[in-house]
Image (tube, rainbow, N blue to C red):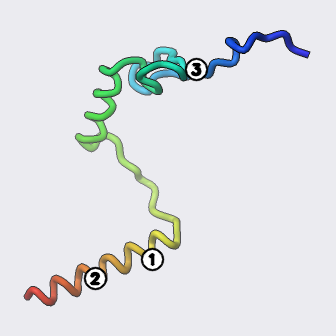
Amino acid sequence: MSNKSPAAKIKTLRCPTCRNIVLATGEDFPFCSDRCRRIDLGKWASGDYKISTPIQDPDLLEELARSNKHKRQNDDDVN
């Protein structure tokens, strides 16, 4: 049996921006600071990060197909 205190169970990980260790209880978790959070947001906004795998969820694919069909019909009605 282990004698570890509850404090030893605090989850930690590395900040995705600067790789510093971050506690799960930190105010800016999973980032170490507001600065790193904003850097990450800027990368998403500028297109540095991309989701490159195709959509595999059949329900979502069907919904996208219906949405595209509806959009094409509306475009044809306008012209």
Give the alpha-carbon distance from disc 3 to disc 1, as whole Å. 39 Å
71 vs 17, nearest the viewer:
71
> Considering only vertical position in the picture, is 62 above or below 11?
below
Which residue matches tag 1?
A: 62
Residue 77: % across, % down: 14, 89
Under tag 1, what secondary structure?
Answer: helix
Q: Name the amino acid type tagged 3.
A: Thr
Q: Residue furthest right?
A: 1
Residue at the spot 46% in from the left edge and 63% down from the top edge: 55
Q: Name the amino acid type tagged 2.
A: His
Say which mark, if any, is on residue 70.
Answer: 2
Give the alpha-carbon distance from disc 1 to disc 2, as whole Å. 12 Å
Residue 35: % across, % down: 30, 20
Which residue matches tag 3?
A: 12
Residue at the spot 84% in from the left edge and 10% down from the top edge: 3
> Considering only vertical position in the picture, is 79 above or below 36?
below
Sequence-first disc among 1 and 2: 1
Give the alpha-carbon distance from disc 3 to disc 2, as whole Å. 47 Å
Q: Assign the N terminus to one quadrant of the image.
A: top right
Q: Residue furthest left?
A: 79
Q: Name the amino acid type tagged 1.
A: Glu
Sequence-first disc among 3 and 2: 3
> Considering only vertical position in the picture, is 76 above or below 20?
below
Residue 58: % across, % down: 52, 72
Tell me where residue 71 sits by quadrant: bottom left
Number of numbered discs visible in the structure rendering: 3
Residue at the spot 39% in from the left edge and 24% down from the top edge: 17
